[in-house]
Image: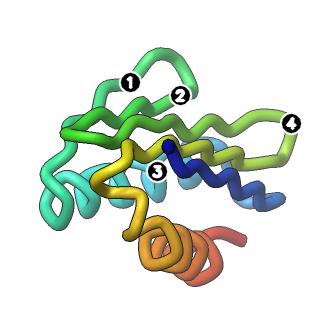
Amino acid sequence: MMAKFRLTKPYTMEKKEVRDVAERLAKRLEKEHGVTSSWEGDCVKIRGSGISGEMTFHDGVIDVSVKLGMFVSMFEPVLKKEVKRYLDDHVT
């Protein structure tokens, strides 16, 4: 069984600043959870063992979608809380 979550957060800051926040979050996830990230336009995609997701930002909203495989699904509440707190702390 896969777990998944989605978070959205409105923003009013400049798009470049949002991209910087997204880049820092992706780097943090790479360091702490061993995922890789790649950019496609205004979308950063993450991939790792048992995890995939993407974060897009457009029309004043950041949208984060994450899918977790069976073996990492137990970490869904922790990962969701970590991403939400990061966005709440860094996005205005």
Residue found farthest to the front: 1
Residue 50 in picture, x, y percent from top left: 28, 41
Amino acid type of the residue tagged 1 in the rendering: Trp
The vertical placement of 84 against 29, above or below, is below
Q: Identify the residue position indicated by label 3 in the image.
A: 22
Camera-side residue of 44 and 71: 71
Q: Secondary structure at mark 1?
A: strand
The mark lying in front, picked from 2 and 4, is 2
Question: Which numbered marker is on residue 39?
Answer: 1
Of callouts 4 and 1, the N-terminal one: 1
Amino acid type of the residue tagged 3 in the rendering: Ala
Amino acid type of the residue tagged 4 in the rendering: Asp
Q: Could you classify mark 3 by the number of other residues whose Cα lies within 10 Å: few (under 14), some (14-19), or many (20 or more)?
A: many
Total numbered circles = 4
Quarter-of-image position of residue 38:
top left
Q: Identify the residue position indicated by label 4 in the image.
A: 59
Q: Identify the residue position indicated by label 2 in the image.
A: 43
Locate residue 90 relative to residue 91 in the image: left or right: left
The vertical placement of 78 against 73, above or below, is below
Give the CA distance from mark 3 to mark 4. Answer: 16 Å
